[in-house]
Amino acid sequence: MRITREISVPTDVLNEVVSSHIKLGFGIACMYVVEGDGDTGRALETILVSQDEITRLTSALKDNEFISLSGEFPAAGIYEREIFEMSGAVPLGHRDLRTLKLRSTQEGSYPLKKTPSGPARIRPNPIPRNQIKGEGLFEVPVGPIHAGVIGPGHFRFSAAGEPILMLRTYLGYTHRGIEKMLEVPAETEMTSHIERISGDNAVAHSLAYLQAMEGETEIPLRARFIRMILAEMERIYGHLGGFSGIVADTALSVPAARGYMLKERILRLNENISGHRLLFGSVCLGGVRTEIDDSRAKAIRTEMERLKVDIDELFEMLVSSASFMDRAEMTGILATRDAVALRAVGPVARGSGLDYDVRTYHPYEAYHLIEMKAAVHTGGDVYARFKVKKNEILESISIITQCLDKMENGPISCPVEIGDGFRMGMVESPRGELIHCAHIVNGKIWRYKIRDASFPNWPAIEYAVSGNIIPDFPLINKSFDLSYSGNDL
């Protein structure tokens, strides 16, 4: 991904520089700390993204601290919590430094520092009570263990009867140290690790990683079209799962089963064309491992034609159900102003009226060669996010068909040389904008930063549930369809 501008900014004026960019339509897309490499000290990296440009701000840290941006820009809050916990840099003035990722810590140790600390006591990080009190109020703790196969997460509600007054989410139960694990020689292909960051977004994470590593390398056009087909196949099965989960939580078991059946058909198609239901091992440095020959292309076209009819029928079945619409409409509203303030991404943001999709505004692979339209709804409720996903499935079908039509014979891979410096990959995953940043020094990855699409959306769900009843939380949660593993890393 090409950076429009890179600026060195002293920490004492960082707030002003960010403010000027926000006024021009930028948003805070990522913040993290990079350790000094011997010649330089620690630095705070801030990535700002608009519909047209990407700005990278680098601020040398003095005394290992900086003035918090979160008071003026709520989107910065979750990044600053992560920085404080993982790197030890202090965001001065931050009002909410609750533990974000680590349920226990080693005293004096910060996982992303280069210098390990000596032996120290392991200290648990207890979950605090919500800071809301009053007569008739009570707390409802949920998790971290849940029914089904979703990841672990603790949800602490403050409620007056059934209506929710406050929700605080606590994740990090499966922190794996992936960013540290990726500090390897840059030429070491790590797609098998990258795919497992969040397994149902394996292609999206791989494409962000490859985009960062490949830099300006001209990847063969056929390989780029195949990558797009794989990415859209992943989007379709991901949205079908989220789509069906919403239906299941409205207790409509028959249409939910139909939705899951459609997802199963796509997973079987994935296995047919790539050898893996979740498309693992399909892409690689310099191109793809999966070739789409005539027989596979025909199978894809046939399934896309069937799916388009089936998804329209299922959608009509649901919107004609008073029971479904009663549960979905006006439930879990994320107001546009809150989506903007938190810089929500993906279907969550587009369901609240934000017209932003990386594929259209910062096209990668060969998205600039096809026609597509972002699916946007202004309602901000469960139904809006449901409709966005339905429309995105249809758009993905169109994209896949266009790729098959435009794809010509040619190579599917090429050699790649990886140079030193800062590199960034940004893609539109099924859950939204996904960012990978790599700092390469002397041929080795010095710092690797992953910002999963779910990361900025977890704070947004705390806003969306306010004023709703506790029994509707599972439905709202399904409509956000957030990744636990993508957050925990």
Image (spheres, rainbow, N blue to C red):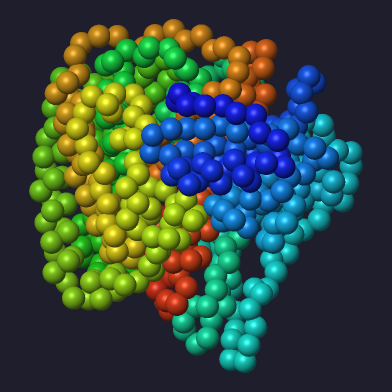
Number of marks in the rendered image = 0
Residue 69 in sight here: yes
Residue at the bottom extreme of this rendering: 135
Q: Position of residue 309 (x, y in %)?
A: 10, 48
Which residue occupies the foreground of this view, 277 or 87? 87
Left or right: 101 in relation to 325: right
| Residue at 87 percent of width and 51 percent of height | 121
- Relative height, residue 222 to residue 95 (above, below): above
Which residue occupies the foreground of this view, 225 or 299? 225
Q: Position of residue 83 (x, y in %)?
A: 68, 45
Quarter of the image where the N terminus is located: top left
Residue at the right extreme of this rendering: 119
- Relative height, residue 136 to residue 219 (above, below): below
Left or right: 113 in relation to 447: right
The picture quadrant where one finds residue 256 is: bottom left
| Residue at 33 percent of width and 38 percent of height | 234
| Residue at 80 percent of width and 37 percent of height | 62
